[in-house]
Image (spheres, helix red, strand yellow):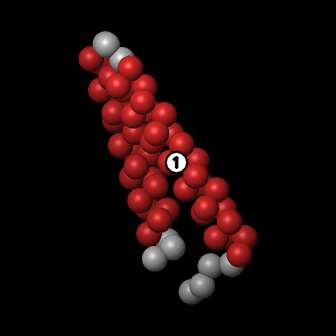
Amino acid sequence: MALTEKELSAIEDQLSGEQLLITKFKAYSQMCTDTEIKQKCETIAGKHQTHYDKLLSFLN
């Protein structure tokens, strides 16, 4: 089943948002000196990477 132009546009928007969140939380993780906060940021970045990968799978 082919995706509509509107669906493709929405997925692209979501991919951009997820990529931004991945980048930000990885950066936050590197800036943190508190190990607990650093780990939380890495976990959040990982969750957004999972979201990104799942969205990308709809395009393949």
Query: At x 36% / y 26%, what residue is drawn?
Result: 29
Rendered location of residue 1, percent (x, y): 56, 86
Tally the marks.
1
**Please, what is the three-letter code of the amino acid marked with disc 1?**
Glu
Residue at far right of view = 6
| Residue at the image position 54 percent from the left and 43 percent from the top | 20
Residue ID at (64%, 56%): 13
**In the image: residue 5, left or right of residue 26:** right
Q: Residue furthest bottom?
A: 1
Above/below status of 16 relative to 35: below
Q: Nearer the viewer, residue 17 or 54?
A: 17
3 sits left or right of 51 in the view: right
Is residue 12 shown above or below 5? Answer: above
Counting from the top left corner in percent of width and height, residue 35 is at 27, 17
Q: In this orientation, which residue lies closer to the viewer: 29 or 57? A: 29
Residue in the picture at 39% in, 34% down: 26
Furthest-top residue in this view = 34
Picture quarter containing residue 38?
Answer: top left
* Secondary structure of residue under mark 1: helix
Residue 21 placed where, x, y %? 51, 40
Q: Which residue is mark 1?
A: 18
Q: Is residue 56 left or right of residue 37?
A: right
Tell me residue 14's x, y (percent).
59, 54
